[in-house]
C-alpha cells in the first residue's frame, strides 16, 4: 500500500484521452489475482458516416447544363474590379455556385440497388428488354418463327452479358492492382472467397463449445451451387483435422440437391423409388387375376404418390406454357402415374394417360403438384411461427424483385392471392392448443330422444352452453376479426383443380373413345368396379377405352393383317361385336337373357350392370389374347 505500481501490457491511443470518463481500481473484478483489476470507461458516442452520393455523368443533359450555368453566371466585370482579394473570391464563389446549380438541374444522382451488378450497363438492359418483348410475342402467337427469334435473342443475351461482366471484372482487377494498397486489397478479396466456409466452420465450433455439442466433420457434405459452366465445382474444404471433398449433390431433408439446382438427382431418385414400388404393385394383380381396382388404387395413393410428391413445394415451378423449367420432373411423374394407372385398371400400355387417369379417378400430375404445393404453403402461413420465419428471411415481399427470384413460399402465396383471391393476412392461425391442456370439459349427458334434447337446450341460458374460448357471444365479431378457414380454402383449391381436370380432359388429344361415351372425371367411374372380378373389370376398361384385343385395334398397331371381322360385315370393333356381329349372336342372346336388347353402345358401357353383363358374355379368349404382348 502506498508503493508504486505498474500496469502491464497497456495499449492506448493519445486521441482517446479526452473521452475517458474514469479509470480506477475495481475490486469486484478481482479473482484471486496478484494484480489490481483496473476498469476503464470511455465516452463512445459514434455516428454513422454519411454515405457519399455520386452523379451519373453519363446521363447529364448537356443543353440544360449550359442554359442553367449561363443563366446563373455573374455579369462580366473589368480588370479594375478584380484588384483586391475579396472581389476575386466573390467572383470564384459565384462561378462555382453557377456550376453546382447547373449540375443539380441537369445531372441525376445515382441510386444503386442492393441487387445491382457491377458492369451491367445500359446495353445489357436494352438486350434484356428486347428478349422480354420477343418472349411475350411468342407466348401470344406460339409460332415457330417467333420462337426461333426469341431463342436466338436469348442466347445472344447470355453471351453479351457474360462477356460484359467478364470484361468489367478484368478491368476492375487491373485498376485495383495499379496501386500497392489496391493490390493487397485484391489479394485479401481473393483469399476470402475460399475462407468463407472456414469462417462458418469456426463459428459453428464456437457455438458447439458454448452449447455442449459436437460436430462430426467426417459427415460434412460440400456442394458448390453454381450454374456458371466455368466455375470450379471440385474445390475441397480443408479443415484443421479433416478435408471435405466436393460432391455433385447432397441430400437435405429428403430432397436431393445438385450443383445447378436443376433437381436432376432428385428426379432420378424419385424415378428409381417409384419404379421399385410399381414392381411391387404389379405383383399384386394382372389384367386377369389379382387384387381389385379399388384396392390397387388405394395402395398407389398411399405408397407411391406421397413419395413422388415429397417436397414438391420446393422444386415445383408452376408454369402455363410447355417446355419450361421443371418439365423434366413433371414428365417423369406423368410416366410413373400412367404406368400405375394402367396396372390399376388393367388397360393396355398403349392406352392414353389422360384416359387411364379418368378410369382410375387419379388427379392429373399437373393438378396434383399444384394442389399439394399450395396446401403446404397454407400450412406454413397458418403456423404460429410464420411471422418469425417471414421476418428472418424477408423473402415474402416481391417489391423490386423479379418473379423468378421469388422463394417457393412467396411464389405459391402469390398464386393464392392472384388465382384464388385469398386474403393471406386473414387466414386462420393454427394454435397449439385451442384451450389449455388442463381445461376440464363440461358435463355431457345424452337424452333418450332428440325432442327432449332440444327442449332442454332451449330452456338453458346461452352463457351456460357457450364454451369460454375467448369469443364474445353477446356481440357479433368485428370484420377484421373474421378469419378465412383453411378447410374452406382447401375446398376451393380442390374444386378448381377438378374444373381444370375437366377442361384438360375435354381438350386432350388422346383417349377420345372414352370421351365419346360421355365419361367425365368423377368418382362415378369407380362404381362399376366395386366387387367386380379382376378379369371383368379389365375387360370393361378395355372396352371403354377402345384399346382391346380386337382386329380394329390390333391392325392399327400392326399386330393383325386386317381390321375386318371374321363375319365379313365390317371392322371388328367393340360396337360391332356387341351389337352387330353374327358370330356373337348366341353370346348376345345370353347377355340380354330375355330382356329388351339395348342398341346404344354408350348406354351399355356406361351403365354398371350392363357393362358387367357385357364383359361376362365376352369370349374369354379375347380377354387373355394379348395378355403376353402388352403386359
Image (tube, grey):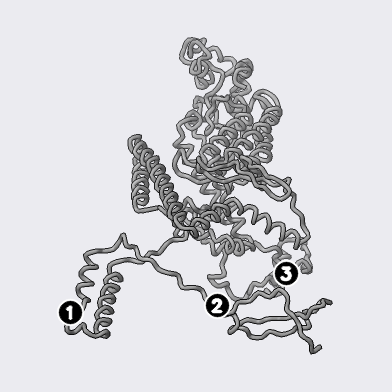
Question: Which element carries disc 1, helix, strand or loop?
Answer: loop
Q: Quadrant of the N terminus?
A: bottom right
**Looking at the image, how many numbered discs can be counted on the residues?**
3
Residue displayed at 37% across by 53% down: 121
Residue displayed at 60% across by 64% down: 387
Check the image and name the residue furthest to the right. Answer: 32
Q: Is residue 619 visible?
A: no
Check the image and name the residue furthest to the bottom. Answer: 2
The span from disc 1 to disc 2 (Cα, nearest Å) is: 46 Å
Question: Is mark 3 in CB contact (under 8 Å) with mark 2?
Answer: no
Whether 337 is drawn above or below 222: the answer is: above
Residue displayed at 24% across by 64% down: 62
Q: Quadrant of residue 263?
A: top right
Pointer 2 local density, CA inside 10 Å: few below 14, some 14–19, many at least 20: few
Question: Which element carries disc 3, helix, strand or loop?
Answer: helix
* Pointer 3 or 2: first along the chain: 2
Q: Closer to the camera, 217 or 381? A: 217
Q: Closer to the camera, 459 or 596? A: 459
Residue, disc 3? 456
Relative to residue 88, is residue 263 drawn left or right?
right
Relative to residue 432, is residue 194 drawn left or right?
left
The x and y percentages for residue 229 are: 50, 40
Residue, disc 2? 46
Q: Quadrant of the C terminus?
A: top right
The span from disc 3 to disc 1 (Cα, nearest Å) is: 102 Å
Residue, disc 1? 75
The x and y percentages for residue 454 are: 70, 66
Whether 193 is drawn above or below 301: the answer is: below
Amino acid at each position: 500500500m502506498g508503493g508504486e505500481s505498474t500496469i502491464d501490457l497497456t495499449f492506448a491511443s493519445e486521441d482517446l484521452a479526452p473521452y475517458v470518463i474514469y479509470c480506477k481500481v475495481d475490486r469486484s473484478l478481482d479473482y484471486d489475482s496478484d494484480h489490481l483489476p483496473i476498469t476503464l470507461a470511455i465516452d463512445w458516442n459514434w455516428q454513422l458516416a454519411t454515405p457519399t452520393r455520386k452523379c451519373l455523368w453519363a446521363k447529364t443533359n448537356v443543353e440544360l447544363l449550359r442554359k442553367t450555368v449561363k443563366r446563373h453566371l455573374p455579369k462580366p466585370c473589368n480588370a479594375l474590379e478584380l484588384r483586391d482579394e475579396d472581389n476575386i473570391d466573390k467572383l470564384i464563389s459565384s462561378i462555382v455556385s453557377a456550376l453546382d446549380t447547373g449540375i443539380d438541374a441537369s445531372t441525376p444522382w445515382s441510386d444503386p440497388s442492393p441487387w445491382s451488378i457491377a458492369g451491367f450497363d445500359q446495353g445489357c438492359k436494352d438486350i434484356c428488354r428486347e428478349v422480354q418483348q420477343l418472349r411475350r410475342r411468342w407466348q401470344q402467337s406460339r409460332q415457330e418463327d417467333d420462337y426461333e427469334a426469341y431463342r436466338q435473342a436469348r442466347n445472344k443475351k447470355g453471351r453479351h452479358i457474360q462477356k460484359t461482366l467478364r470484361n468489367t471484372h478484368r478491368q476492375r482487377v487491373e485498376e485495383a492492382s495499379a496501386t500497392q494498397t489496391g493490390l493487397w486489397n485484391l489479394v485479401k478479396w481473393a483469399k476470402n472467397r475460399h475462407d468463407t466456409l472456414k469462417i462458418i466452420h469456426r463459428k459453428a465450433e464456437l457455438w458447439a463449445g458454448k452449447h455442449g455439442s459436437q460436430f462430426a466433420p467426417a459427415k460434412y457434405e460440400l456442394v458448390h451451387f453454381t450454374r456458371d459452366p466455368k466455375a470450379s465445382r471440385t474445390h475441397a474444404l480443408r479443415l484443421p483435422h479433416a478435408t471435405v471433398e466436393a460432391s455433385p449433390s447432397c441430400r437435405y431433408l429428403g430432397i436431393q440437391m445438385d450443383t445447378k439446382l436443376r433437381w436432376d438427382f432428385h428426379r432420378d431418385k424419385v424415378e428409381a423409388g417409384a419404379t421399385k414400388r410399381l414392381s411391387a404393385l404389379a405383383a399384386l394383380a394382372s389384367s386377369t387375376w389379382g387384387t381389385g381396382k379399388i384396392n390397387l388404387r388405394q395402395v398407389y395413393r398411399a405408397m407411391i404418390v406421397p413419395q413422388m410428391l415429397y417436397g414438391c413445394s420446393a422444386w415445383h415451378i408452376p408454369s402455363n406454357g410447355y417446355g419450361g423449367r421443371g418439365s423434366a420432373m413433371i414428365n417423369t411423374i406423368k410416366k410413373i402415374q400412367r404406368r400405375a394407372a394402367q396396372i390399376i385398371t388393367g388397360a393396355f400400355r398403349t392406352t392414353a394417360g389422360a384416359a387411364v387417369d379418368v378410369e382410375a379417378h387419379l388427379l392429373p400430375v399437373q393438378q396434383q403438384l399444384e394442389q399439394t404445393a399450395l396446401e403446404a404453403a397454407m400450412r406454413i402461413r397458418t403456423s404460429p411461427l410464420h411471422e418469425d420465419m417471414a421476418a428472418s428471411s424477408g423473402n415474402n415481399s416481391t417489391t423490386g424483385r423479379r418473379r423468378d427470384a421469388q422463394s417457393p413460399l412467396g411464389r405459391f402465396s402469390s398464386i393464392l392471392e392472384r388465382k384464388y383471391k385469398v386474403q393471406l393476412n386473414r387466414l386462420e392461425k393454427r394454435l397449439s392448443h385451442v384451450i389449455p391442456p388442463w381445461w376440464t370439459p363440461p358435463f355431457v349427458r345424452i337424452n333418450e330422444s332428440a325432442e327432449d334434447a332440444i327442449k332442454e337446450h332451449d330452456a338453458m341460458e346461452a352463457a351456460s352452453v357457450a364454451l369460454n374460448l375467448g369469443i364474445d357471444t353477446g356481440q357479433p365479431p368485428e370484420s377484421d376479426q373474421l378469419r378465412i378457414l383453411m378447410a374452406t380454402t382447401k375446398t376451393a383449391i380442390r374444386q378448381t383443380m377438378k374444373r381444370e381436370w375437366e377442361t384438360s380432359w375435354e381438350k386432350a388429344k388422346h383417349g377420345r373413345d372414352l370421351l365419346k361415351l360421355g365419361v367425365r372425371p368423377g368418382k362415378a367411374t369407380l362404381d362399376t368396379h366395386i366387387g367386380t372380378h379382376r378379369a371383368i373389370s379389365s375387360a370393361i376398361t378395355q372396352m371403354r377405352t377402345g384399346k382391346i384385343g380386337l382386329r380394329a385395334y390390333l391392325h392399327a398397331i400392326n399386330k393383325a393383317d386386317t381390321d375386318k371381322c371374321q363375319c365379313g360385315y365390317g371392322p371388328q370393333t367393340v360396337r360391332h361385336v356387341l351389337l352387330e356381329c353374327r358370330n356373337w349372336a348366341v353370346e348376345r342372346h345370353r347377355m340380354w337373357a330375355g330382356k329388351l336388347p339395348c342398341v346404344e353402345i354408350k348406354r351399355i358401357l356406361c351403365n354398371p350392370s350392363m357393362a358387367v353383363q357385357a364383359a361376362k358374355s365376352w369370349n374369354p379368349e379375347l380377354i387373355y389374347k394379348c395378355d403376353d404382348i402388352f403386359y
